[in-house]
Every structure is written in structure tokens, then in C-alpha cells.
Image (cartoon, helix red, strand yellow):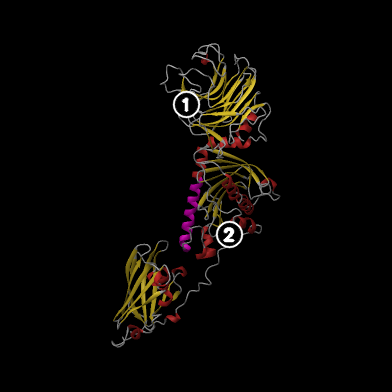
Amino acid sequence: MKKLLSYLRLLFLIILSLSISGCGDDDGDVIDPKPVDQTFLENYHGTVWKGETTIDYADKGKVYIQSYIRFRDSQTVPAELWDEDPDFDNTCYDSDRLDLKDLGDGGILENLNNKLKVFYTETSGIGSEGETLYSATITFTVQGDNLSVNFVWDDLSNDESGTENYYFKRSSVNPEVLPVCDYNAGPAELPDINIVDLKDDSNWDYCVFGKEDYFFIKSKGSLPESVLYYSSEADKNYSIFFSDDGNIDKVIVDDHIFLLKNPNGNKIDLGVIYPDGNIEVFRDLVTAYDWDNNQLKNQKKSIQEWSDVIRWTGRIVSGVPCFISAWAAVATAGVGTPLALWACGNYLLGLTVDILENEFEIHNGFTDVVDAYGTNAAIGSCSSGVDGFVECASGLTSKAFSQWADHREEIENRNNEVQYADDRLENVSEEEPTENLMAYYPMNGNPNDNSNSRNHGNIYGNALLTEDRFGNVNNAYNFQQSSTEMQYIESSFDYNFNPAGEFSFSIWFNWDGKDFWYKSTVDKKNQTTAYAGLLGIGVNESSGHCYNSGPTRFYLNVWNTGQLAIQYSPGGCNSLNGQSLKTDENLFSSNSWNHAVVTHDGKGNLKIYLNNKLVASRDDHSLDLNNFSSKINIGNFHSYFYSSTYPRGNTRQLFSGKIDDVRIYDRKLSQDEINSLFYE
């Protein structure tokens, strides 16, 4: 259809609103018709017909068009066409031919005395094998000095069809003398990169655009403050926020927030906040970008003028697709999928740096762009001619600022997550603590102890390997409790524990929300508050439900109220009430990974950390426990045997969910060491 209309410009892309005004023949004498025994093309060969049409353009309003048709006695090219081009302010004509052979499967249906009917069909394939996509018939009818044109089309690919009628008067004008538009000359060619000063017209300072991509700059003094970058390749908007020193600080796209820290050569530390609030930190992420040489503090030339601001902005922003590409290649969080990206080493950004090495023209608003380049002016989807471009580009500017404002608001609304990720990036420890490490269960395919103690674990029940917090398969254990099966891990031999001295526990856990837990008292099993053993050390066996003179126990509990607690029993009946320390409620929820650390300094200072934050402490605590030896239990209180009524590993005491990276030290960990375990 488009090809046919390019040959028959008078139809103007299936005009939806068309007002036509006929006019008399002011151009000379009327030519007498040919004899009735001849065909249409023989009768009207060489005759010229003039039509006048008013077209309602969306961007130009009503535009008056004058058109001419000249018939030829030809089976393949029965007509020649001329019509004024509004893109040249109607000062010249676009000339073309109704070439049925060139159009494709077309031909003449009727060639009568005063009637000519032609057809055109476009198919999806070659010859009879193809499927018809579009068909049209054009009927020319002469009555005296009047020519009517009936155009019937059927667009099968879009399930659309229509009929239009046009009217012409006979004319004696020689169309060969009409001025023809020179499309090769036209306005100046739009450069590969364009810079527009928008300070007087918008909330942005500059717009830098090529023929597809563009970015807006908001500066602060002589440094960039924010950028909204649109990538046509990804069809996404990236909001980029700069630190006070002019380097990239945060990037947000598709509800993913990226934080950048610690550039080192082509490596950088990256914090990622996923849409669901999950946070990952990537240390020394390898990128295809030299961060050291592209840090502002390492530049020899200071940023003083507008060209320096734009040059620097393009240079530093070009690192964004590089680090997102690197992240997408290694990201393991199940909640995040790699984002569509524009290319690392982006063409437009490269031009920004290269071209601006020399001084470059800056336009004062989009109107100035039109004055310089006319109909060639284009940015993104805005390429609708001289008048439409300014309006469209201004709307694009407003939309870009609205998108940037939404991104800024999202960062503000998620400030706690942003601050948390920022803290994780700031706190860098080179190595995990190994001094006085008495037990370490990394769960890497087995329950073995990787410390020098080699106190390997034994699996009770059908606890299965699963993904760890990084998405690595077979790197954590999943404990699924039921009324018929108990699942936990117990060490092979006893561990000599001194609860009154220095010690530290570290464990990663992910509670699944299931409630096969021991109730607070035996006779209140229907109450809603419940807890389970996460990590415990307790004497192996005794008899009876009352603990008698034993066992001695020490354990870390997890509660379905989102709490952690340190509890112990020095022995004797009702000694379960030896609760040392308990956190507030609602510190964690189900189906999320959390890191718990317990420390004691041997001087009465007992602390609980959750996700690298101190959540409970006592500085006057004295553990009334002597040294004892017992097995280490993971996902359970202890291996205590009640009776046949309460079998070994009572299900109401067992943790349900995932556990990973369990460590026990016989010394107090420092805050920096806790950081390193949390950020590993």
C-alpha cells in the first residue's frame, strides 16, 4: 500500500479527514474529447487534469495541496503524477509515475471510451506461492471536463479496507514546466551528535542527542548532578545520579538500584537492590571500562565550561552499560534477571567525548535545531517535520524529567535499603576470620567440618542440598520437618564448650514459615507463639521429661514472631527458663536469608547481631554454666532423648527451612570480622 501511495501522492496516506474544493479551468481552453470508438488511453493520451485538496495534518493543521495527472497511452505506465510537497512549503512538486509493472502484480482491467480501471496486488511471497497482503483498484472516469478517481483498497495484513473519491478538472497546464522539488539538496544534514541548551525552557540544562539515543543533563555548578539516558537499543530510561565529586553514585532502571563504590582499574564494587528488596554486593566486579582513568579526580583538565561538563558526562556515563553488562553476566539472585542493555562503548557516548575534543556548536533550544537542519531534525521518536519536531521534543523533555523524578522518589522511598547497601559497600574486609575457628560447616555438597577439628556432621532424616543465598546449587541444606520425619545435622563427636568464656556463633538461615516447632510449654501446645532450635550444644542423653540433674544445654533459637533468643539450661527441672537474651519481634520474615551472630567476651557481655546489626545485648550477664562437652546440633536444640513418647529429635523443636555457613569460635568476633562474614 505504501508503495502505491508513493506513486499516487494525491491519496496522501489514506486521508481520514478530507475536504475538497473544485475549481474552474483557469488555465486555458478545454480540449474536446476523442471519438467514442477509441479506448480511454487513446482518447485522453496527453491530457492534463488538475485537482485541489485540503488535507488536515496532525502537526501542520489544514494544508492546501494542488495536484496534476497526465494520461499516457501505455499499458504499463498509464498516468504521470505531480503534487505539491508541504515539506517544501508547497513551493515545488513531487513528480512520479503510476508504473503498474514496477508496483508488482498489477495491470489494466478495463480500458473503455471514458473509463480506465487498473489494479494492484501485493503478496508475501514470489509468484503464486505467496499470500495476498494488499490489493487495490483505481477507476478513472471522464464526464465532460470532469475526471473522477475512485480508489478501493483492502489491507489484508491489518484487516482494514476503504474507499476514497477524488475529483479533477481538465487543464491546459504543461506539467513539465512545474518546479520539481530537489530532495538531494534539502536542509543541512543532521550531525551524528547535537547539543541543545535547555536552561531557559526546562528543568534540564542540556540535551545531547544523536539520531536514536539521547540524554539529558542536570548540572550542579560545573559538575553533572543527574542524567536521564534513553537507549533505543534497550528501549529503556536510565536515571544516573552523581556524587558531589562528579562521579557516578547510583543508577536506577526497571526498579533495580545500582550503587557504585571502590573503583580499582577495570574493577568496581557494586551493590544491587532488586525490586523485591533483596540486596547483593559484588566485590571487584570485572568490567570493560577503566574506572581509574575515568575518575574525575584523576583528570588533568578541570571542568569549567559547558563543553567540559558535557564531555565529562558522556565519558563517565559510558561506564554504566559496562558495569551492568558485567553484573548481568554474574548475577545469581533468583529475583533478578539481566536487564536489556545498550552496548558497552556506546557510539553516542563515544562521540560525545571525541567530537567535543574540539569546540562544538550548541543550539539555544529545539527551535534553533530546526532553523539549522529543517526537516532533518530528529531526536528519538520526534521526526515529524519542522513544526512538529519542536513540540514533540519539548514533550520528550518533560517526560524525561518526570521519569527522572519518579526514579529519584523511588530511591528516597527505599532509603533504608539504599543505606544498608551503601554500608555494606563501605565496610570492606579482605579475609574471613579463621583464628580460633573450632567448627565450620560450609554445606558445600556435604555436612563436613572444614575447620582443623574435622568434627564432620551426620545427617538425620532426608535433609537435602539446595541453593545458597547466592543461588549456588548444592551449597546449603534444606530441612523439611513432618510428623513422620525429623531432619537435622549432628556432629560426629563432642565439642568442648566453655559458655562462661569467650565464644562466637555465626549462621545463615532462611525460615520457610512452617511451624513444626516446640511450644513454649508442654501443656500449651495450641498456642501461636513457637520456637525452634537453630544451633545448639547439649548433652546427648538422659531419661524422663524432667531434666533431673542434667543435661546442660546452650542454644540459639529462632521464633515465629521474627525473634532470636539465646537460651540455656544448667540442669534440673524447669531449667528451660534459663533464657539469657531475646531480641525484639519482627526482625526477619519467612523465605529470606538472614545472618545471625552471637558473641560473648567472657566478661558478661553477651550480644546478638542480625544482618550485621546489633539487635540485642546484655553487659551484666553471667552464664551459670560450667564447661561441658556435647555434640553440635544444627537445625535442632540438642540430641536429647526424652522417651518413646518424645523421641530423639522431637519434631516440635526442629527448624524448618535452609541453613548455610555455620561457624563456632572460642573467642569473641570483632565488628569488622562480623562485617566480613556478612559481606562474604
Residue 127 seen from this side: yes
Q: Which residues are magenta?
A: 385-404
Residue 235 in percent (x, y) is at 50, 53
Type of amino acid at the residue the image marks with label 2: Ile
Tag count: 2
Dot 1 falls on a residue whose secondary structure is loop
Residue 636 in percent (x, y) is at 53, 25
Q: CA distance from mark 1 to mark 2?
A: 59 Å
Q: Is residue 396 left or right of residue 48?
A: right
Q: Nearer the viewer, residue 197 or 231?
A: 231
Q: Is residue 507 left or right of residue 74?
A: right
Q: Nearer the viewer, residue 590 or 33?
A: 590
Type of amino acid at the residue the image marks with label 1: Asn
Contact between labelled residues 2 and 1, with CB atoms less than 8 Å apart: no
Residue 115 in percent (x, y) is at 30, 80
The residue labelled by disc 1 is 560
Residue 234 in percent (x, y) is at 52, 53
Residue with the most extreme front position: 644
The residue labelled by disc 2 is 193
Q: Which label sits on residue 263?
A: none
